Image: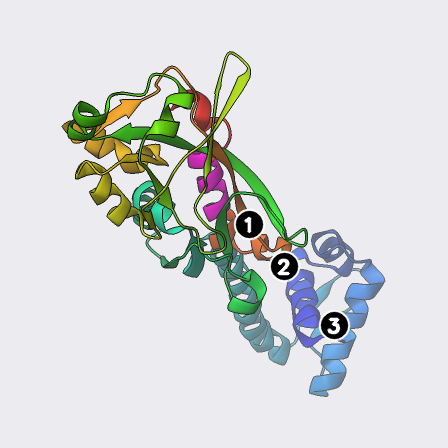
Amino acid sequence: MDRLTSMSAFVAAVQAGSYAGAAPRLGLSAQMVAKHVAALERHLGARLLNRTTRRQSLTELGAAYYERCKHIVDEAVAADSLAQVMSDMPRGTLKISAPVTFGSYSLMPFITGFLRQYPEVEIDLHLTDRAVDLVEEGFEAAFRIGPLHNASLTARPLAPYRLLVAAAPDYLARHGTPLIPSDLQGHECLGYVFWSRPADREWQFSRNGETHTVRVASRLQVNESKALLTAAIDGFGIVLGPADFLEPALGSGQLVRLLADFQAPSRPMHLLYSAHRQKTAKVRRFIEAVVGRFGPLTALSD
């Protein structure tokens, strides 16, 4: 029999004054409690309890052994409690992947806030537009913008990744301001080159349920968002970029938002993770926090 279980049965029998009294505490029958105590006595080669039909009492060895067993059982209970607390307390390193622009501008304030809330957590954030392999590369979670291709991962939908169209006042003074999406065909439009595919040559807008697709010219194509922003501020062309990324330049007047009456393209965004990863406290809390900040409902309040 398991020694710790037998010790627990012995301690409970002493405290309850009988095997029958100890049984409900342990979820065992009185006969099983008696078997556990008997197993200890066989192991020790000595009697622990003097038993009659009316009462039981500790032997001299039994009294000393009881004190030691009680300490051991109490420590075991405390250890189990500590394990439960630690399993509920986020701690350890989270390895996360996110697209470069989203990670740098939208995600980073969330990451620092999460670390302040959970001081026992460390985050190893990899910013890349490459679709990482979570299992092979050891990522707990990854933000993915665009269509999903891996059905083996759990995907939590987030609010669509909103884009805006903008240009510098100097550019608009020289080339005019587009008023409808089709006007973009006569303008210099800056293209962002993704890791897995070329720059988008078709920009899609919507208004009143109607979709407007325009094919744009992109003489300058860049795979880094800051460089693209610099070109736009320099007045070289019109930029299509994430709202969070462009808002500082819009607020300072370096850029002017265009086609505000139209809804600019947006891309689906998900948080991906393996199902078994969600079992750890650090991943559970991270997923909950991400959905709370970037979930579909947040789009209604932005």
- Who is closer to the viewer here, 40 or 136? 136
What label sits on residue 15 in the rendered view?
A: 2
Taking the view exactly as shown, the residue that stands out farthest to the front is 186
Q: Is residue 51 above or below residue 244?
A: below
Q: Nearer the viewer, mark 2 or mark 1?
A: 1
Element at badge 1? strand
Q: Residues within 10 Å of mark 1 (few under 14, many from 20)?
A: many
The answer to whether 63 appears left or right of 13 in the picture is left
Query: Which residue does the image show at 37% across and 22% down from the upper left?
Result: 183
Taking the view exactly as shown, the residue that stands out farthest to the bottom is 45
Looking at the picture, how far across and down is residue 112, in whole percent? 30, 48
Residue 122 showing in the rendered view: yes
Magenta span covers which residues? Answer: 286-294
Q: Residues within 10 Å of mark 2 (few under 14, many from 20)?
A: few
The answer to whether 233 appears left or right of 263 in the picture is left
- Who is closer to the viewer here, 192 or 95? 192
Question: Which residue matches tag 3?
Answer: 37
Question: Which residue matches tag 1?
Answer: 272
Q: Residues within 10 Å of mark 3 (few under 14, many from 20)?
A: many
Looking at the picture, how far across and down is residue 271, in whole percent? 52, 46
The answer to whether 63 appears left or right of 108 in the picture is right
Q: Tag 3 or tag 1, which sits nearer the N-term? A: 3
Query: Which residue does the image show at 49% across and 36% down from the upper left?
Result: 267
Q: Is residue 111 above or below residue 240?
A: below
